[in-house]
Image (cartoon, coloured by chain):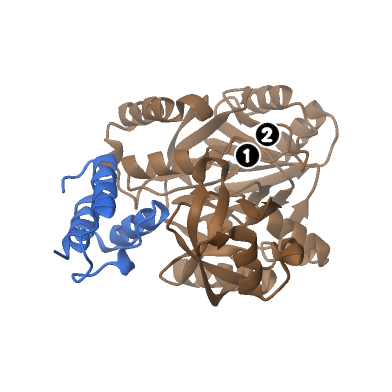
Chain colours: A blue, B brown
Amino acid sequence: MSGQIKNMIDSIIAQKSKGDGALSQLVKTKLVLKGIDPSKFGLATPDDPAIIQKLKQIAMEFQVAV
Amino acid sequence: MSIKTAYSLKEDIRESVSDIKNQLRDIKPKMVIYFASAKYSAEKLSAEMQKAFDKAAVFGNTTAGEIVTGKMLKKSLVAMAFDSSSIEDVKIEVVENIKSDGDKNLKKAFESFEKYYGIKMSDLDYKKFVGVVLIDGLSMSEEKIMDSIGNSTNIFFIGGSAGDDLAFKQTNLYANGKSYANAAILALLKPAKEFDFIKTQSFSSLDKKLTATKADESSRRVFEFNGRSAAEAYAEALGVKCEDASNYFMSNPVGLMVDEVPYVRSPQQIKEKSMCFYCNIKEGMELSVLKSTDIIKDTRKAVEEKKKELGSISGIINFHCILRTLELDQKGLAEEYGKIFSDIPTIGFSTYGEEFIGHINQTSTMLVFK
């Protein structure tokens, strides 16, 4: 299976930035600093359980649902 | 005048503070931010500054060198005063025991901000509010604090890590007429006018990548890059001998790239072929090896562009990395750097690390007021 990571990242960015373009960039930077570079993941990226777990943790820290 | 700066080189604390107060006599300050050499007793200086500006929110920290309009100084006290036409409101919180209880105490600080402004931190408008963060520069807690701040709010916090004139013994923060170590000061500002940021670092990417394959975040130590000992991989990327690698730290740090802009991590030392940095690197992070460019040219360009964008600048708070200051000193360019800010009320200091979204090195992060 693939694509789950990208979908989770997009969802986290959309929720945390509340649809504001400037804040989307801010959230992307925060993700990179947390060790997840959104530009490295696409719909063809395999669903790596370790990264999915990390994104769940980040979502919890941001208080958003994924 | 809504924003005004002052500086003093006097040795005696009372004389220095009196000097500053005298220079700021034609402004009724709502907020005073100040930076001072560690030569002054932190406790006494904080008490005197609070007494001198008793109606204002007064805060600051010790430094490794100071910046004031048109000048780079050493062993001085510099201050910037804002009246109510420049700062509508400000609330200061001290987060103590950041090494052990940072998260818990940060939460309390945020609750206090929410109560004061009547808005949840997560709902604050990033166009109306901005945070200043000053952190104990020897606490190694900056990443954790900045990460926790970023989790709870979308407003920008910008700032720096306090210095101690390169003694590396104790840095201090000033607020409420007291001094603090193992702490962070957060000031939540509601500026009366537009504000913006400059994040400038003078590096280009060499297109050589190093991925941290074994690292310890808490000690800011990388054991392996690309599956090899960190120092060997770094030296190879630069095409130099491993034993010479430390000679390249200043000119060739590494950067976490976000849309081709580096968030710089500066190497500190080599320990048994591992590398210690002034900033943490997480396992799995891909970094670009950087090459230094011209600090004066790049900074001047960044300030001029921001001035053009905003139309005018009424004040700048400049959090300027000590490694940049050392490079400028070595090249005899400190005076020229200071002159970039000669027609803009400016205050700043040489930091032990800069804060903007996260913790970074070899950068200037600036809060710019229109």
The residue tagged 2 is: B171
* Vertical relation: B172 (above or below) A37: above
Residue kind at label 2, given as amino acid type: Thr
Quarter assignment of residue A26 = bottom left
For the residues labelled 1 and 2, say whether their Cβ atoms are less than 8 Å apart. yes
Using the image, determine if residue B101 lies above or below residue B134: above
Q: Can residue B64 be seen?
A: yes
Position of B160 relative to B267 (above/below): above
Please report the residue visible at 37 percent of the width from the left and 53 percent of the height from the top. Answer: A30
Q: In the depicted view, which residue is nearer to us: B66 or B200?
A: B200
Q: Residue furthest front?
A: B228
- Identify which residue is drawn at 33% across, 59% down: A28
In depth, the one of B217 and B171 nearer the eye is B217
Q: Nearer the viewer, residue B280 or B325?
A: B280
Q: Is residue B284 left or right of residue B246?
A: left
> Residue B242, position in %: x, y?
71, 65
**Callout 2: SS:** loop
Residue B292 in view (yes/no): no
CA gap, disc 1 to disc 2? Answer: 6 Å
- Say what secondary structure mark 1 lies in: loop
Earlier-in-chain disc, 1 versus 2: 1
Spot occupied by residue B51 in the image (x, y as percentages of width and height): 65, 22
Which of the numbered marks, if any, corresponds to residue B137? 1
